[in-house]
Amino acid sequence: MRFSRSCGTLVHPTSFPSKYGMGDLGYEAERFIDFLVRTNQTIWQVLPLGPTGYGNSPYASYSAFAGNHYLISLDRLVDKGLLNKDEVEKAELPVMNKAEYEKSYELKERLFKKAAKSFYADMSDEDKENLNSFKKKNSVWLHDYCLFMTCLKANDKQPWNEWDKDLAQRKPKAIAKVEKNQKEEIEYQLWLQFEFFNQWYELKSYANKKGIRVVGDIPIFVDHNSSDVWSNPKYFAVDKQGNRQLVAGVPPDYFSETGQLWGNPLYKWDALEKDNFSWWVDRFRQMFDLYDSIRVDHFRGFDAYWEVKASEETAIKGRWVKGPGKKLFKSIKKELGELPIIAEDLGVMTPEVEELRDSFDFPGMKILQFAFDSDSTNNFLPHNYPQNCVVYTGTHDNDTTIGWYVQAPDVEKHRMREYTKSDGREPEWELVRLGMLSVADQAIFPLQDFMSLGTEHRMNLPGTVGDNWLWRYTNDMLNSVDEGRIKLLAEMGNRVPSANKED
């Protein structure tokens, strides 16, 4: 579908300032939304909000449906009377520019358990009604997820295919035993999800009331060690015990001689189609409830995907396999109506992928950092854009624009300076200006570029492990942003809703 002419900022909640080691859904999130309002922006884009596993990557989650409970705000729990202020203050950590996930998880886990006990002990009739309503609304995934997380903790977070055979294969007696013996932990996992969704919906409502549209992110593949694969093995390329048989990746290219072996189990699309793609319909229904629109990661995989045997050590020996294509999106559209989707169509695209994208009017993505490595025919140069697209300076996988410019070849720097008629002293603002004034319907910029930050503030470097997803900003950094400059560029680019325009 087409979107109105607008602009906004990309920043994940973990990057917000916080006294508890990582950003959350509390008051600093509202403060960021107020910043968007002041600067004539109407879009907030986030990364996937699911519970993260090893490496803390939002793209490797224990569930395609659940929320990351570590984003729950402790301050909000104090407001609700589930924790007292003194015990929360004792849990404070020094404010830093990088998330301290392990320390944060440890202190939050202890306080969350106290809050959950308080909730269940003093549960009002209204609380019971709200909890039951939440369980009913999310029945397709919630109980399985709570069971999965309970079993995962009991098995020292080992992959589910390494659990006891009966539990891995979800034998009724094994499941019943967990439900009986681990009832308290299951109820704790339930409360975590209940509280996460309550806090998220409150925050999203705050944003929507101020004219901010929230853009989410849905990875095409799910993690093998997830509730999704454990509870729906018939939809995934795994054997009876749950061992992967076929996995996802991309073939060798300019960037990698051996390709990329992602390791996610591939879908059994025939089985999904026999069920009218119900799992995918449920997934998109959940996402459209969480967000106002969605960026679909690795969109080309719906047309064709790279299939590799799980026994392979690289992605070299793979093959292209036809995906579900239009059949999937027609089924979703039939059930859910108009699809407010952004297609992540980066990389080598085929005419078939472009036709799939355009047949549903999904806007694609344009990255300005990619615009200067060739001549005037480069598709990422603004004069080559269609209106139905989203322009970015860079995404979470790119360097900051200053970091990109510093490390770019001289010829790219020269092309950028020529194109922008600038001296290159503020490359981040030159690219923001290009995006704002382009014909692209939507223009979205990483917060780091509005803050004029260098490469040390990068969010993710694909293909590496250990130092990603950590970036956070401080209140001083947000206060230092030139809000007037953003506001002016939004006005010049005709990206301000008529109701917000000044006479």
Image: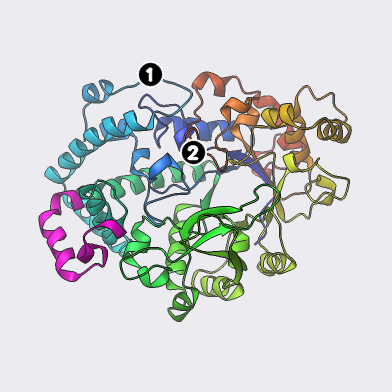
Q: Is residue 361 left or right of residue 125?
A: right
In terms of image quadrants, where is residue 36? top right
Above or below 232: residue 227: above
Above or below 180: residue 215: above
Q: Quadrant of the C terminus?
A: top right
* Span shown in magenta: 161-186
Note whether residue 134 is visible: no
Q: Quadrant of the N terminus?
A: bottom right
Q: Secondary structure at mark 1?
A: loop
Above or below 411: residue 116: below
79 is within the stretch colored magenta: no
For mark 2, what is the residue?
465
Above or below 270: residue 176: above
Name the residue type under label 1: Pro
* Image x and y of residue 457, in percent: 57, 28
Q: How is the image coloured?
A: rainbow
Name the residue type under label 2: Val
Question: Most extreme residue toward the bottom, as rendered?
Answer: 274
Q: Could you say which is closer to the camera, residue 421 or residue 441?
A: 421
In terms of image quadrants, where is residue 362? bottom right
Mark 1: few/some/many CA within 10 Å (<14, 14-19, 20+): few
Q: Secondary structure at mark 2?
A: loop
* Image x and y of residue 147, in percent: 24, 57
* Image x and y of residue 381, in percent: 81, 45
Tell how many labels. 2
Q: Nearer the viewer, mark 1 or mark 2?
A: 2
162 is within the stretch colored magenta: yes
For mark 1, what is the residue?
94
Residue at horizontal 32 percent and vertical 65 percent from the top:
231
Q: Could you say which is closer to the camera, residue 137 or residue 353?
A: 353
